[in-house]
Amino acid sequence: MQNYYNQIKNSPVFFGISEEELKEMLECFNARIKTFDDGELIIRQGDMITNIYLVLDGIVNIEKDSYWGRRIIVSQLGINENIALAFVASKNVESSIDAVSIGKTKLLLLSYQKCTSMCQNVCTKHKLLINNLFEILSKENIELLQKIENISQKTIREKLLTYFSNEARRNKSNIFEIPFNRQDLADYLNIDRSAMSFELSKMQKDGLISFEKNKFILKNV
Amino acid sequence: MQNYYNQIKNSPVFFGISEEELKEMLECFNARIKTFDDGELIIRQGDMITNIYLVLDGIVNIEKDSYWGRRIIVSQLGINENIALAFVASKNVESSIDAVSIGKTKLLLLSYQKCTSMCQNVCTKHKLLINNLFEILSKENIELLQKIENISQKTIREKLLTYFSNEARRNKSNIFEIPFNRQDLADYLNIDRSAMSFELSKMQKDGLISFEKNKFILKNV
DNA sequence: ACATGTCTGTTGTAATTACAACATTCGTGA
DNA sequence: TCACGAATGTTGTAATTACAACAGACATGT
């Protein structure tokens, strides 16, 4: 756990909290580290989630299986991001999503109940923590809106361009790497992988983009 | 304002707060009521949002115009719901959505800054309010996930059935009214209106649903 | 260097959808 | 009750997509 103190201290959850306070809080919150293997399910649809999950290392996909057996990738989380915070914060609501470990992952687990109830007596920084969680939830909300915009486009090309524009803006550069492989990108944008590959090639021929593996360049038109 | 005290008191934002406390808080928060006409823009894409908006009366659509001129309806809000809370809570983030008044609407505006800063000295129930906002944001988050599931289905029929199933579950009955007209429902599910009408008719012939205007019955298959 | 499996790109075809154009129903006010 | 406009339903066609099947590139371990 100690190895990660510095990283945890700099995560949005504990923003503004000193290393001294952090140690106290982690104990207070029943903090523990859990590791997962590739493909392992961290959270299942239907689970009641009682812990805050913070990604310390690796990548986690948030997925959903439709009734008709189609896989939807809702989002992909990296280091210092939280899994399914909304379901932790909502009382008596089952998770409607799966969280899947991509490669080996290392997660920090905190008891949400201890974070919000007991802590107000023990830790002085309780209020700050709640504010941080509030900020994180807002950001998640806005990112979901972004995803809705991505998949609401009509054609494959429009979906890709919308997604690329946002990635470019996020990286503040027209050159960026995407975290998905082709199949996952297709599942994220809700399109067929092979049709997407075909369209990517066409877009490159048309001079809209160029790419090599996962590194893309969005040409300004 | 007084006319609405009882309603406001029972809204999720002020859950657990007495009418006495409410009066004090509303003053503390610069509370004011604003009315909007049909089609009027309450919030525009690009706006910096500094107020909490609570719907007192009427319906508000959350919309988004795509780069290619396509309208997306993200969600529809009714009485006691909040508009774009995520953008209020995120510092320095512009709204990526429009909020549009459907018919005449009446909104309660509260200064977010006063809610979160000044109030901790003045009002005793400040912590409760923050917790309430946190809960609301979580619910919004989960509803956005639901919407993602709806529009991520492959065919028009699957989109409609997914949407209807969720409405039925929400109403705890297989008979329910939907808040959209046909065009808005199509924009919500990201499909063509006429194609949707056609599919609705077919589904009725196939015995999956029956409907009359906005009242639908989902047959259990 | 070879075999193996995974990822990515390409192509043809069938299915689905968007779109436009029109028909019908419904409500409202004159 | 009539006329009008708005909302909804219907139909044919062109465009787009999903799907399947395959080919090539790449990485990995033996």
Image (tube, coloured by chain):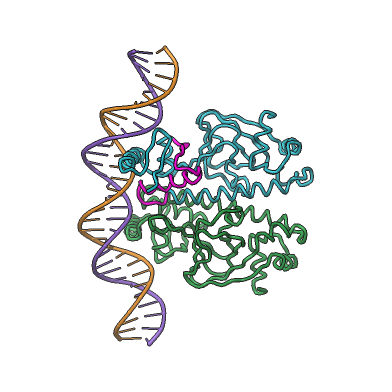
Chain colours: A green, B cyan, C orange, D purple
**Residue plotted at (64% across, 52% down):** A134
User: Is residue B169 rendered magenta in the image?
Assistant: yes
Front-lying residue, B103 or B166: B166
Front-lying residue, B160 or A162: B160
Can residue B69 be seen here? no
Can residue A50 be seen here? yes
Instruction: Pick the quarter of the image with the N terminus of chain B.
Output: top right
User: Is residue A35 rendered magenta in the image?
Assistant: no
Position of A80 with respect to C1 (left or right) is: right
Say if B165 sits above or below B31 in the image.
below
Position of A115 with respect to B216 (left or right) is: right
Q: Residue B177: image x %, image y %?
A: 46, 37
Say if B75 sits above or below B141 in the image.
above
Q: Residue A78: image x %, image y %?
A: 54, 64
Q: Which segment did they paint magenta?
A: B151-180
Say if A15 sits above or below A38 in the image.
above
Front-lying residue, B133 or A173: B133
Position of A131 with respect to A176 (left or right) is: right
Q: Residue D15: image x %, image y %?
A: 28, 46
